[in-house]
Amino acid sequence: MEAKNLVIVESPTKAKTIGKILGSNFTVISSMGHLIDLPQKSLGVDIEKDFNPEYVVIPARRKTLADLKKEAKKNDFIYIATDPDREGEAIGFNIRDNLPKGKKVLRVLFHEITSSAIKEAFQHARDFDLNMVEAQVGRRILDRIVGYFLSPLLWKKIARGLSAGRVQSVALRLVVDREKEIKKFIPQEYWEIEAEFKKDAVKFLAKLEKIEGKKIEIKNKEEAEKITGIVRIKKFLVTGVEEKEKNRYPSPPFITSTLQQDAFNKLKFNASKTMIIAQQLYEGLNIGQDETVGLITYMRTDSPRVSAEAIKEVRVAISKKFGQDYLPAEPNYYKVKKHAQEAHEAIRPSLISRDPQSMKDFLTPEQFELYELIYNRFLASQMMPARYLTTSIDISADEYLFTASGSKLAFAGFLAAYNHEEKEEKTIIPYLAKDEELILSKLTPSQHFTKPPARYSDSSLVKDLEEDGVGRPSTYAPIIYTLILRDYMRRIRGYFHPTELGIKVCDMLVGYFPKIMDIQFTAQMEEELDEIEEGKFNRLKVLQEFYKPFKESLDYAQDNIKKEVIKTDQVCEKCGKPMIIKWGRKGKFLSCSAYPVCTHSKSITTGVKCPQENCGGELIERHSRRGFFYGCSNYPRCTFIAKHLPQEDESKDEQKEELKEEPKE
Ligand SMILES: [Zn+2]
Ligand SMILES: [Zn+2]
């Protein structure tokens, strides 16, 4: 009789795909994520005893664990095939600890769910990586300590029910600081002067750059008019012509952060949505003839490394599709960041022969769009650079120097595969010789103002979190999701606006916990967690280093923090005392300042009428477990709700998405 094998994974879809690949000697079941975690109602960390965690079985998962145990008894071999990262290693390790003793339990790792990758993985089954588990435990404990101790302080200071997370709070700080910069910003006026010339029926523009060799700064209309008055009657000579060839190189294949950035910029997907769809592509889809397969490699990664096999395949595909000219002599290699998990790979199609068009019938429109983006970016990453011919022209009118530049695509290279943004107008410059005289056809001064920095979007926030070293592939999307859920910021037309509540929470944390809110300190913590994983650092040391300054701030805050009162100009209809703003479970509301003597309270109205016909109510701010929304003041008679006020309403679908789906943390 053949040996019986049990395989444990963390998601039902993945279990289905793998089950089909492995066949009937294998039983594949899902743990539904973590089974074991810190307790819900207490700290669950023994600070006195080396910060030891007190893990418990998650109550809602007791039955799943019992089923797993029963199944384990029936099988000869047990394999744990959770996702190939810290989180997956920890989920698997905790399961192993709870299985019946005496069974051989092995860990298998694969970065793509295809028949060959999985068979290969089972041949290399190994023991658990204890350093990786330690790193995850360290992170969990740090996050628990911060959440557990900071939340009650926020309750005391601002409102009950608020919570703070370690890395989220630093992200919130970026958003709040940006908002403050924008509020503070004073636009500066400046002027530009453009000259239009014509040669051989081609019109082109040149910009005034320098006067007497110095960069020009024109502050106002008077100055601009004075200069145009002088320049207008001068003789214009071509004093420099420079032609150059310029290469533009392809970007590396996607890692989590760049996938989220590009999916936002090109497909308008927010970070959570990108991860949910990527996970579907990774875990496996039916691609016809009852074949189920994962179309992309694992989507949580910070390494642009690509397997030798995949490089070989993509090079063949490039020469077939575009021709030999588009294929570099040697494969392109991309630098791996410090601490990136070496074993990981970039996000790429698992099989290059499954081109997007041939998969289209089996994918939803959104799955198709994301797959196509990943596929083409991977092709492009192994292609030749694009080549441009650029021309720069200097045009002098005595001491006034104008410049013009143009560029022409000479060879498309990788742009043939991945060209989403190349719609920028390329200026065409006619042939010009040195010392040639030009006839001015127009001279146009124009007024401009300096612009404040832009608010963060999913794309730019993920970019900065990565650059600042505080985000990791598994955390970008949950950070953004959580800040919106808690109504610390809102996504309006794709950009993050911190709410009043978010600003209050941030200010309180910066004031009392400068270290926790310090970007560099947080980045250092993250780096030390990475080093635990590499076996170069120990968990206790990281926790001690963190806990000492944290405890000092905590003690000070507990003794000194006072309830904050936010006054309004409204008075209480019952007793005439001023009304103040409070935050409750259902969001912001007005409360009588004489509370508890007077208990009068009311909703804050927005002044926006309920759009429901014949309702006559007004939209008020509300809050639920799912996040922030606007509801009708006539509730429950009228059940109208909206994520945005009508005038903010543009990205309705995206916001609905946010309410509906929750990324795995
Ligand atoms: Zn009152
Ligand atoms: Zn209504």
Image (spheres, helix red, strand yellow):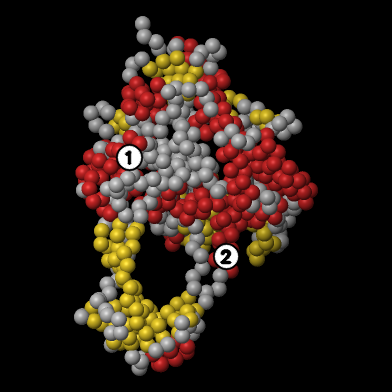
What residue do we see at 33% from left, 30% from top? 114
Q: Is residue 369 above or below residue 110?
A: below
What residue do we see at 45% from left, 14% from top? 77
Residue ID for mark 2? 181
Q: Is residue 303 above or below residue 232?
A: above
Residue 307 visible (yes or no): yes
- Image quadrant assignment for residue 240: bottom left
Tell me where residue 83 appears, x and y as whole percent: 45, 31
Residue 363 visible (yes or no): no
Q: Is residue 245 above or below residue 418?
A: below
Q: Is residue 408 above or below residue 397?
A: above
Residue ID for mark 1? 311
* Of residues 115 and 640, the one drawn nearer to the viewer in this rendering: 115
* Of residues 385 and 463, the one drawn nearer to the viewer in this rendering: 385
Q: Give the CA separation, mark 2 to mark 1.
A: 45 Å
Quarter of the picture holding the N terminus: top left
Q: Would residue 245 appear left or right of 222 to someone viewing this image? A: left
The local crowd at label 2, few if under 14, some if 14 to 19, many if 20 or more residues have their Cα within 10 Å, is some
Tell me where residue 8 appears, x and y as whole percent: 45, 23
Secondary structure of residue under mark 2: helix
* Of residues 290 and 569, the one drawn nearer to the viewer in this rendering: 290
Q: Nearer the viewer, mark 2 or mark 1?
A: 1
Q: Would residue 456 appear left or right of 540 to someone viewing this image? A: left
- Image quadrant assignment for residue 203: bottom left
Tell me where residue 262 appears, x and y as whole percent: 39, 51
The furthest residue to the top: 1
